[in-house]
Image (spheres, coloured by chain):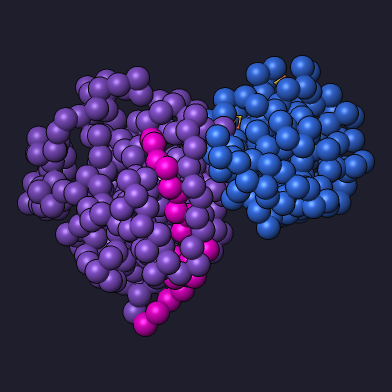
Amino acid sequence: MLPFDFEYYKPASLKEAIDLYQTAAKNRKKPMFISGGTELITLGRINLVHTEAVIDLKDIAECMVMQFEGDYLVIGSTLSLTKIEETNHFPLLTKTASEVADHTSRGKITLGGNICAQIFYRETVLPFLLADSQVVIVGPSGIKVSPINNLFHEQLQLGTGEFLIQVATAKRFVTAPFVSIKRRQQWDTGYPLITVAALKIGEEVRVALSGLCPFPFRSKKVETLLNNREWPIEDRVNSALSELPGPILNDVEGSAEYRLFVLRNLLHDVLEVLGAS
Amino acid sequence: MKSQIIELYVNGDLRTVTVRSADTLLYAIRGKLGLTGAKPGCLNGDCGACTVNVDDWPMKSCLMLAVEAIGKNITTIEGLKKTPIQQAFVDNFAFQCGYCTPGFIMNCHSLIHQHPDADDKTIKEWLGSNICRCTGYAEIEKAVKTVLENQ
Ligand SMILES: Cc1cc2nc3c(=O)[nH]c(=O)nc-3n(C[C@H](O)[C@H](O)[C@H](O)COP(=O)(O)OP(=O)(O)OC[C@H]3O[C@@H](n4cnc5c(N)ncnc54)[C@H](O)[C@@H]3O)c2cc1C
Ligand code: FES
Ligand code: FES
C-alpha cells in the first residue's frame, strides 16, 4: 500500500503510451512509466517516488520481444529477468541478471526497470555497455535507435516522455568469452559490493563495473591500461586503478579502501580467466 | 482516496474487490478478501513472507499492485489443499513459529511444479528468496527434497 494515490493505465501500443504520458504531463500529474513496478512500490512506500499517473508498459508487444533479427539479438524492456535467464540467449546477460536480487523478485523485476532504475546499481546494463548494444527508444518525436554508449552516462539519458522499448546486440558479442563476478558484503543475495562484467573481443578485454561508484560504468581509459600487454599484469591493474572515475562508494556495504582492495583482486581474476595475463 | 472495483481470480474463484490503484496485491488479498495466509514482513521484497503464486510462478505480493494482477491466476496458501509439500512440512518439522511458512510453501509448491527435477543449485536459488527467522532451513530443504524424490 502506497501513501499516495495515482491513476493506473495499461496502454496496448507505443502510441497510446506516449499520448497518455503527454496528456498526464499536461495535467501536471507527474506521469511515470513502469515496467516491473517494484521500484514504484519500494521507493513510493518511503516517499522517494511520487506520481499521480502510472503508465504500465507491460502490455506493449514491442517491449516483450526476445528474438534474433538478422545479425542482432533483440530483447524487450518489459521482460522479467527470470524470463531472460530461462531463455539464455546472451550468456553474459544471463549470468549478470541471475545475480540481481533473488529468484522470486527477478520474476517481477524487468530489464527496462533495472537499466532505468533510480537505485544506482543497474547491474544488467553492464553486458550491453560491453557489447556496444543499440537502444531502441520511443518518445513524442518517434522511434530512435542509438548506441547505448552514446546515451548511457551514469544513467540512460531519456528525454521527457521517452521510454526504452528494446536493446539490440550484435551476435558476435552475444557469443564472446565473458566473466561476470558479483561480490557482496555477505551471503549470496543482495546488492553488490562490486559487480564486474567482462567480455573478450579478439585479444581485447572490456570491463564494466557496478557498485564501485554511485553509477555503473565502462571506461575506455581503464580498458586501454588493462590491455597494455607490454606491461606486467601488476602494473596494468595498478594503472587502471589510478584512472577510475569518482567518487568511490564508502557506505554500509563497504569502505572505499575495501572496495578498491576487492576490485584489485577482481581485475586480476578477470585477466586471468580471459587469458589476458 | 480514489477507489475502483476490479475482479481478481483467486484460488479458482473470480472475486470482486474495491481497491485503490496504489494498493499492493498483499494488502488486497489480506485486507479486502480476508485471505491472511500471506504474511506482511518487510513489505520491501526482501523476506518472502508474502509469497503467493501468480500464473504458477512465485510472486512477492508486496511487490505487485492489485491492479497488475487483473486477469492473472492467483493462488494463496488457502488455495492449497492437501498438497505433498504441506504434508512434507509437517512430517519434517519444517516450521517453528510458522510466520514464514505460507511464503515458503508457496515458493516450494511452484518450484516443484516448474522444476520437478530440481537439483541442489536450483533449490538453493529459489529458496534463497525467503527468510526464516527461526532458521529452520535444513528442515525446509528436507521437506522439498522429500517431495521431489517421491515424485
Ligand atoms: C528485493 C530487491 C532486491 C534488489 N536487488 C538488486 C540488485 O542486486 N541489483 C540491482 O541492480 N538492483 C536490485 N534491485 C533494484 C531493482 O533492480 C530496481 O529497483 C529496478 O528498477 C526494478 O525493476 P522494475 O522493472 O520493477 O522497475 P519499475 O519500478 O517498473 O521502474 C523503475 C524505474 O525505471 C523506469 N522505467 C521502467 N521501465 C522503463 C522503460 N521501459 N523505459 C524507461 N524507463 C523505465 C521507471 O520510470 C522507474 O523510474 C532490487 C530490488 C528489490 C525489490
Ligand atoms: S513482505 Fe513481501 S517480501 Fe517481505
Ligand atoms: S518458522 Fe519462524 S520464521 Fe520461519
Where residue A59 sits: x, y (%)? 52, 63
Residue A158 located within the stretch drawn in magenta: no
- Magenta span covers which residues? A49-70
Residue A66 located within the stretch drawn in magenta: yes
Extreme residue in the right direction: B82
Q: Residue at x 10, y 48 (%)?
A: A221
- For residue B66, side relative to residue B32 (left or right): left
Extreme residue in the bottom direction: A70
Where residue B95 sits: x, y (%)? 79, 23
Residue A191 location, quadrant: top left
Q: Residue at x 42, y 66 (%)?
A: A16
Chain A shade: purple
Chain B shade: blue
Q: Between A263 and A158, which is closer to the camera in this rendering? A: A158
- For residue B26, side relative to residue A7 (left or right): right
Q: Between A254 and A38, which is closer to the camera in this rendering? A: A38
Residue A250 location, quadrant: top left
Where residue A178 sits: x, y (%)? 35, 56
